[in-house]
Image (tube, rainbow, N blue to C red):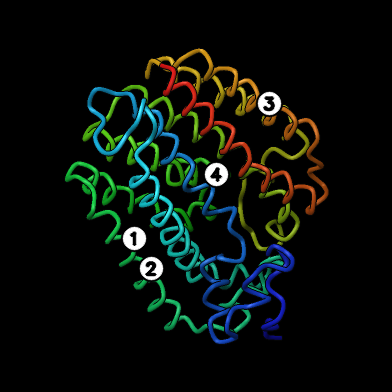
Amino acid sequence: MNESIDQGPQDSVPGNWVDRSAPPKLRPYLRLARIDRPIGSWLLMWPGWWAIALAANSEAASGWTVLGSPDPILLALFAIGAIAMRGAGCTYNDIVDRKYDAQVERTKGRPIPSGDVSVFRAVIFLLLLGLIGLAVLLSFNRFTVGLGAASLLLIAGYPFMKRITWWPQIWLGLAFNFGALLGWAAATGGLSLAALALYGGGIAWTLGYDTIYAHQDKEDDALAGVKSSARRLGTKTKPFLFLVYALAIALFGIAGTLAGLHPYFFVGLGVAFLHLMWQAWRVDIDNPEDCLNKFRSNKWFGWIVFVGIVVGSVWG
């Protein structure tokens, strides 16, 4: 049965503007790009924004900054790039995974497996989104352009990881947090140990939140033969979450120290740590709705870390 134009897939935000107001002919494409589920764009954007803010008081930083504040032009470009590339990544993933998605209750209503968008049209849409992302990338310095081109290897490989490893979440972390390297490079023209520590912390963070996300589909994934950290860990998920979230905070702390942030940064990082501990403690891995809610709460985690970095940079 084709997906209704008035109601999106099961994991979309209820009452989102796509379902309410978007032209009916555009809705399948907006859903294909996950515009009705913006949390993915937030998660892709945050590492880049954190890096831009972290690099703001670096001697190599360029652009419009006041008292160590992040360059608003870079922030805007990374926001646009995150939306476009997240949409392109999801479209590519849905093309590759269309047969698997058709077997999973939560994803069978997506535009391609439901028949609302053909594979050919999805490819054209993918190319259009890719051109937007390319336009954003080409606005940066040459080093950042080269780094961004290298990230395409990670994006291209991700859909296949769930077929060959129990830990596709690690690969997702490598791809989704590449913005930490791009953001620092765009702001400074190079890389640093602070950027690498931020990247490592982001990978650990993603490994946690995407394991929570994967628990929504563990039963269907088992039937379809799809691997995930959720299936591998099972009842050991919560101790694992405490571990990787603690590692993420430690690496973020190292990044802030290397970047010379004011101790005020660590106040924000402490609040962020409490948020992640709340996720790990309270998540019900057998309740798909709760898993989705905890996953979405990482939008606020991103804000906490970002504000902490800005405050620590301004007073650094």
How many C-alpha atoms fall within 10 Å of the one at disc 3: few (<14), some, or many (≥20)? some
Residue matched to label 3: 242
Q: Residue at x 64, y 43 (%)?
A: 211
Relative depth, front residue between 159 and 204? 204
In the picture of the structure, the residue carrying the numbered disc 4 is 169
Position of residue 152 relative to residue 94, above or below, is above
Q: Are marks 2 and 4 in contact (CB under 8 Å)?
A: no
Q: Disc 1, disc 2: CB below 8 Å?
A: yes
Residue beneath disc 2: 129
Q: Secondary structure at mark 4?
A: helix
Does 244 sit left or right of 286 as displayed? left
Circle 3 or circle 2, nearest the eye: 2
Q: What's under tag 4, amino acid-wise?
A: Gln
Q: How far from the left and from the top, in percent, is residue 249?
A: 56, 23
Residue 267: give x, y in percent of width and height: 60, 18
Q: Residue at x 42, y 23 (%)?
A: 313
Label 1: state its secondary structure. Answer: helix
- Mark 1 highlights which residue? 133
